Amino acid sequence: MFRTHLVSELNPKLDGSEVKVAGWVHNVRNLGGKIFILLRDKSGIGQIVVEKGNNAYDKVINIGLESTIVVNGVVKADARAPNGVEVHAKDIEILSYARSPLPLDVTGKVKADIDTRLRERLLDLRRLEMQAVLKIQSVAVKSFRETLYKHGFVEVFTPKIIASATEGGAQLFPVLYFGKEAFLAQSPQLYKELLAGAIERVFEIAPAWRAEESDTPYHLSEFISMDVEMAFADYNDIMALIEQIIYNMINDVKRECENELKILNYTPPNVRIPIKKVSYSDAIELLKSKGVNIKFGDDIGTPELRVLYNELKEDLYFVTDWPWLSRPFYTKQKKDNPQLSESFDLIFRWLEIVSGSSRNHVKEVLENSLKVRGLNPESFEFFLKWFDYGMPPHAGFGMGLARVMLMLTGLQSVKEVVPFPRDKKRLTP
Amino acid sequence: MFRTHLVSELNPKLDGSEVKVAGWVHNVRNLGGKIFILLRDKSGIGQIVVEKGNNAYDKVINIGLESTIVVNGVVKADARAPNGVEVHAKDIEILSYARSPLPLDVTGKVKADIDTRLRERLLDLRRLEMQAVLKIQSVAVKSFRETLYKHGFVEVFTPKIIASATEGGAQLFPVLYFGKEAFLAQSPQLYKELLAGAIERVFEIAPAWRAEESDTPYHLSEFISMDVEMAFADYNDIMALIEQIIYNMINDVKRECENELKILNYTPPNVRIPIKKVSYSDAIELLKSKGVNIKFGDDIGTPELRVLYNELKEDLYFVTDWPWLSRPFYTKQKKDNPQLSESFDLIFRWLEIVSGSSRNHVKEVLENSLKVRGLNPESFEFFLKWFDYGMPPHAGFGMGLARVMLMLTGLQSVKEVVPFPRDKKRLTP
């Protein structure tokens, strides 16, 4: 056993008790007669005192920061120390020595640029800020799932090696699969639709891949997609569900990660339900009225969303009813205007974090929709054939975890959030 | 809105109420003056009555099984019907027509072989048995996570496109990554170790890939791996954690999936803690004493595990302390016998469902371990470099979800359990 307590579990009531703590040497101050070690473990940072004359003294006098140690010692209440306690070392075991100097300062006093941080990622992930980010992410995905469990959703796992492209062939990574060409899934779209056609309500949190050529703060080649699909539902049902998911997620993070948010010096936005909805057509008109050069059919990109955000002054808003042709083939047209679709994006300020829609569930309409987009229905036969066998109306969405994390942490780039990001130039670590 | 109630929510207290239900036409009986429809939704099966003369009658008289419909009607208590109620249709809307005959019988009366089932998978997944399997899986992974949350583990997501092989180059799927050769991760092993070296306790549930040439009931090319890594811990800590995970998982499934287990006519094994441990060396001796031709250093495969199970008569047991050379390079040797390792497998009867160990955390030992196995330390530089910067002792395991599901459902092949399995001959659906 490496420890009896985490450092955060030490408190003045333990005064006089023998304890064993283990962790990383976060900082060392040598005051001659005494060495003060700040010992960091997953729970926080505690203070160790090593007296001259103790045989542990020589072991640690030249120890490198980030070495790992086990300290046997006695708790002593001291109001000046973290948590009001110090551990006076009786013996110290060195578990691993860290080389000095470190290529990155874990205490965060010396700032590093993102390239250095990603290259020296293990040390970077030990910084309290990155530990906070990872903790918040874990709470966020837990919250996402809990809201869905409450609504009777079943977690599923869909195949990631696929025979053909979901939404056209662009941006796919080819895989050599037993001598055959296959691809990495861009999204679980078609498979989650099929599963909704069997068990109605499904969700999946899994990697997806898109060969992004561009280097932006919002794109990675490999990303975690949080996907939901729901039968006997339309996009309004889905937007109502997303409101609950986001509301719970933000509030769960605020409640369970108070300390982590303090470390990040950030407060996630408040969610007001219902979340504001603005139609694509109204958004275009609004943008035009602000002098933006945009017309019906154009995408509303980040620069335009910034203008929209300045006008709407809402941290979160849906842009609904997008032009049908600008959305993927499985998107359902609006009954009263087939130029438009039953679709939406959820925007955090100027960043799309969710995209969803009602789906077509009629085979002939899907086939036509593929053709209109220059795609070959034969390549989608494995998908289309099921629409002969009672596919219900259904709707769903995909949510990008790393982008949601920007909303939850205040960080500015998905490359910071993802522990080991993959982009055009990064394949290691 | 497609429905006011799920069919399982209907009960005699609603007698006389107007309701709206939606689902699949599971079965139809035409008694001349009346048509009885068994309507299936995600909650179960309910009975609809359509009287001759009602305009819905003509709509459904020739309807194909598995078509989806919405029924507006009035609840009538009737002790002979499922849940003691029928819905007398006032109107029926057909949402989608299913073609007849179906290529697979969803009611399960006509059995199909596994190839047919996988080819006609959407219909197969609608069978109550497969719905039960998917529900049980969702509860099992929820339970897995909940045990880990309780122990302070953080859920992480590691990269799946990697530059080099984790445990040697065999059985890797190559990916073309922006013109460079890369691979699909066989396991999150090295990345979860690094994350444990930063935040101590991590887990991940994610796909992993192994190019399995053989066609067995226990192997797939793409599988969901449930991975845990824990710093300041050894394999005994990990085995104790696994005991709790398995205990909770089996009991959560028994409690939350009573109905699903009834559908499958199966009871998962009881877990007795502590789970029996038998050392590899003792297992070899025991097998020899039973006439099995086996010697120290050999793998203990499924045929040998069957013999072992017959002797031990335990549904679950650990085989511990495997020969060091038969385990991956990151496995820690035993201090008192470097031929052996601090490693274990957890066996369900004769099936390995978990594999784990204490890990080496000393760079020189790791480098030597790679060389002894004919691997080149330079290929692992992205991993090894961190062992210069305070990697703590750590331990962990990987658990195969599909195999665990065999234990939880009584099914005989992982190909049945996984909705869209990938093996040498299957890339669709």
Image (cartoon, coloured by chain):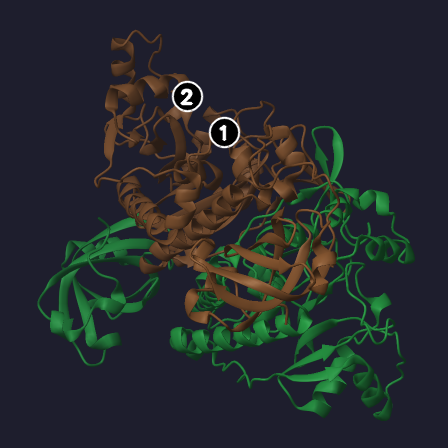
Chain colours: A brown, B green
- The amino acid type found where label 2 is placed reads Thr
**Which chain does the residue under circle 1 lie in?**
A
Looking at this view, is B52 or B396 the one in front? B396
Residue under label 1, please give it. A218
Residue at disc 1, secondary structure: loop
Residue drawn at (73%, 84%), measured in percent from left and top?
A: B278
**Which chain does the residue under circle 2 lie in?**
A
User: Circles 2 and 1: CB distance less than 8 Å?
Assistant: yes
Residue A358 point in image, percent of width and height: 34, 39
Q: Dot 2 surroundings within 10 Å: few (below 14), some, or many (20 or more)?
A: few
- Does B197 sit left or right of A198 as displayed? right
Residue at disc 2, secondary structure: helix
Looking at this view, is A138 or A92 the one in front? A92
In this rendering, is residue B72 above or below A225?
Answer: below
Quadrant housing residue A163: top right
- Does A102 sit left or right of B6 as displayed? right
Looking at this view, is A368 or A400 the one in front? A400
Q: Can residue A63 be seen in this snapshot?
A: yes
Residue under label 2, please give it. A302
Q: Dot 1 surroundings within 10 Å: few (below 14), some, or many (20 or more)?
A: some
Residue drawn at (67%, 32%), measured in percent from left and top?
A: A426
Residue B317 point in image, percent of width and height: 66, 82
Residue A54 point in image, percent of width and height: 69, 64
Residue A112 point in image, percent of width and height: 60, 30
Quadrant housing residue A162: top right
Looking at this view, name the residue that lies furthest to the left: B16
Q: Can residue B224 be seen in this snapshot?
A: no
- The amino acid type found where label 1 is placed reads Tyr
Looking at this view, is A154 or B19 the one in front? A154
Residue drawn at (61%, 24%), measured in percent from left and top?
A: A213
